[in-house]
Image (tube, grey):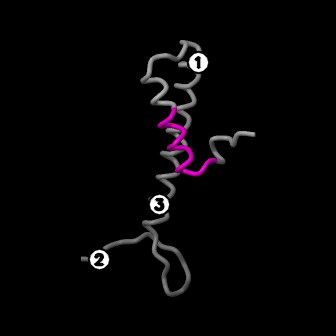
Amino acid sequence: MAKKEEELTFEESLIKLETIVKELENGSVALDDAINKFTEAMNLSKTCNEKLKNAEENVNKILKENGKLEDFKIEE
């Protein structure tokens, strides 16, 4: 059974997205299939973008001595 796009890891989503792009670039996909693959690719792209955004937000936090996460700020 195939995983839903939300359940795929970032890497799995990216590999699947690259595969779809190669198939569409090949030009041998029927129009209806191409539309479905394009829709799937857009959903995968959205999922990857959301995962990257969440990762960026987590990386930009710092654990303080009191155990609380706070936004990382460079003090000049």
Please tell me which of labels 2 and 3 falls first in the chain: 3
Amino acid identity at mark 1: Asp
| Distance between the alpha carbons at the discs numbered 1 and 3 | 36 Å
The magenta segment? 8-19
The disc placed on residue 44 is: none
Amino acid identity at mark 3: Glu
Q: Considering the numbered disc 1 on the image, is that residue within a helix, a strand or a loop?
A: helix
Q: Which residue is mark 3?
A: 57
Is 9 part of what is drawn in magenta? yes
Is 58 above or below relative to 30?
A: below
Quadrant of the snapshot with the C terminus: bottom left
Q: Which residue is mark 1?
A: 33
Q: Which residue is mark 2?
A: 75
Comparing labels 2 and 3, the label whose residue is closer to the camera: 3
Where residue 65 appears, as percent x and y from the top left, is: 50, 87
Q: Quadrant of residue 47?
A: top right
Which residue is painted at 54% across and 12% down in the image? 31
Comparing labels 1 and 3, the label whose residue is closer to the camera: 1
Amino acid identity at mark 2: Glu
Where residue 68 appears, as percent x and y from the top left, is: 54, 78
